Amino acid sequence: MPAAGSPTRNRSRRAAPPVLVRQVRNGIEESVHRGDIVEVDVNGRMLRGLGDPDHVANLRSCVKPFGLVALIEAGGIEAFELEPPELAIMASSHSGEDLHVRTLQGVYRRVGVSQSLLACGAEKMPLDELTAARLARDGEKASPVRHMCSGQHSVFLLLCKLRGWDPMGYWLEEHPAQVAYRTVVAQAFGTTVSKLKLGIDGCGIPTYAFSLREIARAYAFLADPAAVAGADSRSSMAAGLTIVRDAMLANPEMVGGTRDRIDTSVMKALPGRVVAKGGMEALRGLAILAGPRGNGAKAPASGMAIKIEDGDGFDRGTWAATVEALSQAGVLSGQALRVLGRYHRPAETDPHGRVTAEAMPAFELAPLAELIR
């Protein structure tokens, strides 16, 4: 039994979050996915939600659009003649398809950086199953450039090239490339570097933890960087973040991939309306640009954070919750909702193609803007 005063005894217990998605087979509920959802405006005012908006999650790959601003503010676009598709892949978790590899290798050749410097590894990559099968058939081993985080790691390598920093150890917390990256991350989240809570991401670089409310506010900032008041500490990075947002909106295949990537599919179904970016352990940030909602009235930009409690190793929980949350927020309807049907109620099939089970969203977001005064 733990001693009194030990970390185990003092750890506060988190109440079970609400059920968001139910896995049903032949009318029998086999399992559930619990989680939390929050939508806020650029100032952090809560609009909709369910569960705990103050639940803390590691950003993982959800950090990528914000960290890229470090390279933009350093003059990387001008110095390296970076194009929007190249910027989009640096904010991505790409599938490792040939178009992703060609895009990054084109940057490396033009800039004069060796892809052998990439330190993200290549285990379980590429994400794209058809590409992985082809490589296996041809006896080709995936290199780190096919890792889903190689675009993000390229940001660090380009910063090193631009600033004259030694790229060796660029993944370490104390490396100047990491210092530059987390400085803009702290600014995007309205805090200071000294207050950041750091961990180590799966690709070896630092990751940062924030509450879902803070993550949603950062994504609202991504949706409309110009909406931040001049006195706000985030305002000076608005121009750079606008470039990132527009590059991602214009190149959704670079953000994810051409097959079975919900971020890409959502952005293509809602062109110019949503930037979607997932992170490991079933976290997703959604930057919802200003525009008409379900009632036809134009709504200002907002940000949404969705976290599935169990990490959702099957993807079905985060897929279903993402589409349903956008639908309930009035962003997604009609033909766009039908296009995303396979994500809305992900189906499981047997070897003969028969549907055997479905993941069904089972929640209702509370209109917090109406309830909280």
Image (cartoon, rainbow, N blue to C red):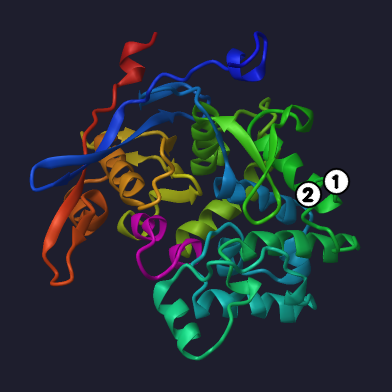
Give the percent coordinates (x, y) of residue 79. 78, 67
Q: Work out which quarter of the rendered image holds the C terminus and state it.
A: top left
Residue 254 is covered by the magenta coloring: yes
Would you name the residue on which mark 2 appears?
A: 178
- Name the residue furthest left: 27
Q: Amino acid at mark 2?
A: Gln
Give the percent coordinates (x, y) of residue 80. 75, 70
Q: Amino acid at mark 1?
A: Glu
- Prevailing secondary structure of the magenta residues: helix
In the rendered structure, find residue 277 and report the number of the disc placed on it: none
Q: Quadrant of residue 282?
A: top left
Tag 2 near tag 1, CB within 8 Å: yes
In the rendered structure, find residue 174 and report the number of the disc placed on it: 1
Query: Range of the magenta residues?
Result: 252-267
In the depicted structure, whether residue 79 falls above or below residue 310: below
Q: Quadrant of residue 12?
A: top right
- Look at 11% across and 65% down and name the residue there: 354
Dot 2: few (<14), some (14–19), or many (≥20) neighbours within 10 Å?
many
- Look at 53% across and 69% down and name the residue there: 125
Is residue 276 rendered to the left or right of residue 227?
A: left
